[in-house]
Every structure is written in C-alpha cells, then in structure tokens.
Image (tube, helix red, strand yellow):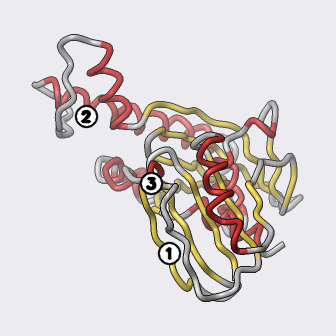
Amino acid sequence: MFLLIDIGNTKTKWMLRDNRSIYKQDSFFTEDIDQDHFRFDKPIQKILISNVAGFEKEAILKIKLKFFSCPIEFIKPQKNICHLINHYQDPHQLGADRWLSALSLSQDHYKNVVIASIGTAVTVDLLTYDKNSLTSTFEGGVILPGLHLTKDILSSKTSDLKKTHGEFHSLPQNTSDAIESGFILSVLGNIKFFFDLALTKTKEVSIVLSGGDAYLVHQHMDENIKKYVSIKKDLVLEGLFVLAKL
C-alpha cells in the first residue's frame, strides 16, 4: 500500500492506494498539517511526498509519519526518469508539483500538452512528445499569482482596490469585476500562448487543467480551444504513483 501526499500552499491532498485501486483519499488545509490526518489499519509499504510549502511543513510531517516504519521520500525533480526529460536550466530547481504533473501526463498523453495548474499560484507549462524516441520533455513555462493571491496583493499594496468578490465580464464596469476578469483573461492568454507554441511543433496538442480554480477558467475558454481541454484534479498524486511503482 502506498501513501501519496501532495503538500500545496493552501491545501494538502493525499491518497492511499495500491497498484490496482484507491482505498481512500482526502484533503485538509496545509496550515493544519500538525494534526493527525493519517491513521490507517493497513500496512504502508512506501510514502512519497511532494512539498511546495516550505521546509517547516516538511519537518512537521516527518514527525507525524515516522510511526509508519516505512521509507518516506520527499520527491525532488530529476533530469531524466520514466521517458521524461527535464529541460529546466537547473532541473533540481523545478517545483516538484510541476515536475510530477508532467510525469503523470507523460505516461498516457503521447502528444504535446499544455499543463495549466490554477491554484494559489498559476503555472502554465509545455510538455512535448517525440514519437521517434518515445520520450516526453518538460520544456518550461510561466508562474503567476493565483486569483486569491492576486486579490491579496492588490488589496494590501493599493489604497482603493479592496478584496471583494467579482464576476467575469468582457468589459468590466466595477473594480471587483475588473480584478476577477483581469485574472481570468491573463490565465487564458498564457494558455493560448503556449497552445499556439505547441501547434508550431505538431497538430496533436491537448490542454490539461488542474487546481482549485480550473473550472472557473474552463467556463470562460473559447469553444475552439475548449475542445482540446480536459480537467484532471490529482495530477501531482498521479505523478507520485508513477514513482511509487518503480
């Protein structure tokens, strides 16, 4: 049995599974990582963890998990593994979540993929596929603030832009809608840029959305783009599962 844990900036998601099926999965706020979330009556063979929330959270979780008496591995990106090549300038500096998402998709998406994770932060990355070598390559991508982080920054650094709920409009006519719409259009613009870039290499391209605001962005996508899109909520956990089976 594998325990797979994805420590995000806001939420931590986990999955208990074996090679055939998922036995249990859940999530909790990362700020509550010091509580007892992992109590199982099944023996754990291996624990694999992705962490983008800092060393303190990692140290706390190590203490909470040591009673399982099994290998615990905090995953770090590698240059080359499982037919996935990492083209980041320093492969070890790539975020574990971005690398694991690419690893997950490299196992069953034999085409170029634009990966957009829309959460506390937004990342839009390009994964390319080479039919001759049967390898995928993480080419790189961009990082920008997520919706709530955008609102926090604007409300704390400006005097008139308050953190309130807005709605998307093509021509916003109040400040809250302007912020919401600006964020969504920014994400859509980045996705479209990488989609067009992927199309210059091959016509076989897909777009995969993940993260807490994936559906928010998806509903505002152009229909001509939307037909290329799928939403997968557990890309990082699926990437951890690829490594767990090695």
The one nearer the camera, 238 or 8, is 8
Which residue bears the numbered disc 3? 32
Return the disc, 3 or 2, that comes first in the chain's sequence: 3
User: Residue at coordinates 68% horizontally, 48% vertically from top-left?
Assistant: 96
Residue 25's tag is 1
Return the disc, 2 or 1, that comes first in the chain's sequence: 1
Residue 9 appears in the figure: yes
Screen quadrant of the N terminus: bottom right
Is 221 placed left or right of 111 in the picture? left
User: Residue at coordinates 84% horizontally, 63% vertically from top-left?
Assistant: 82
Q: Nearer the viewer, mark 3 or mark 2?
A: 3
The kind of residue tagged 2 is Glu
Q: Distance between the residues labelled 2 and 1?
A: 31 Å
Look at the picture and state if 33 lies above or below 138: below
* Element type where label 3 sits in the image: helix
Where is residue 148? Give x, y as percent. Answer: 33, 37
* Element type where label 2 sits in the image: helix
The kind of residue tagged 1 is Gln
Where is residue 119? Give x, y as percent. Answer: 44, 46
User: Residue at coordinates 51% horizontally, 81% vertically from top-left?
Assistant: 24
Which residue bears the numbered disc 2? 180
Q: Distance between the residues labelled 3 and 1?
A: 17 Å
Is 53 placed left or right of 93 in the picture? left
Q: Do the residues labelled 2 and 1 touch (CB within 8 Å)?
A: no
Look at the picture and state if 4 lies above or below 141: below
Where is residue 110? Give x, y as percent. Answer: 70, 64
* Element type where label 1 sits in the image: strand
- How many residues crowd around disc 3 within 10 Å: few (fewer than 14), some, or many (20 or more)? few
